[in-house]
Image (tube, rainbow, N blue to C red):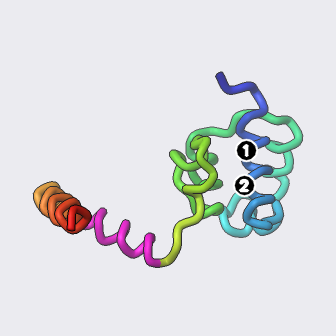
Amino acid sequence: MLDEKYITNRIRELCDKKRMSMYALSNKTGISQSSLSNLMKRGSTPTFYTLDKICDGLGITLSQFFSEDMGKLELSSEQKRVLETWESLSDKEKAAVEIYVRGMKLK
């Protein structure tokens, strides 16, 4: 169960991990510094839209924001390229790639 300050604590944690100040987060998100400051001081829950903008500014997805596995937050440029290519594939192409990769692993 998430407590009432989970989201603001998580924002702080991720900013610290990425060595990003609230000023930098404000610049990346387009959310004013005063709005971010008020959110963080009150420990209130932002709207979905605001949280999505914060995640974009942090370079993560909403899923990663709520993930317990911190190791998945940092992707190499190679992993990012593979995921971008994967997202552009049709379901049929994804199935073919999966079969191919599993076949490679068996060798």
How much space separates mark 2 and mark 1, taking CA atoms? 6 Å
Label placed on residue 74: none
Query: Which residue: 12% across, 62% down?
Result: 96
Label placed on residue 10: 1
> Residue 81's spot in the image, x, y percent?
39, 75
Q: Is residue 37 left or right of residue 102?
A: right
Place residue 30 in its image quadrant.
bottom right
Tell which of 63 and 44 is nearer to you: 63
**Badge 1 element:** helix
Q: Are marks 2 and 1 in contact (CB under 8 Å)?
A: yes
Amino acid carrying label 1: it is Arg
Residue located beneath label 2 in the image: 14
> Residue 20's spot in the image, x, y percent?
78, 66
For label 1, the crowd category at 10 Å Cα-Cα, with few meaning under 14, some 14 to 19 and many 20 or more, is few
Report the residue that reaches farthest toward the right.
Answer: 41
> Residue 87's spot in the image, x, y percent?
30, 63
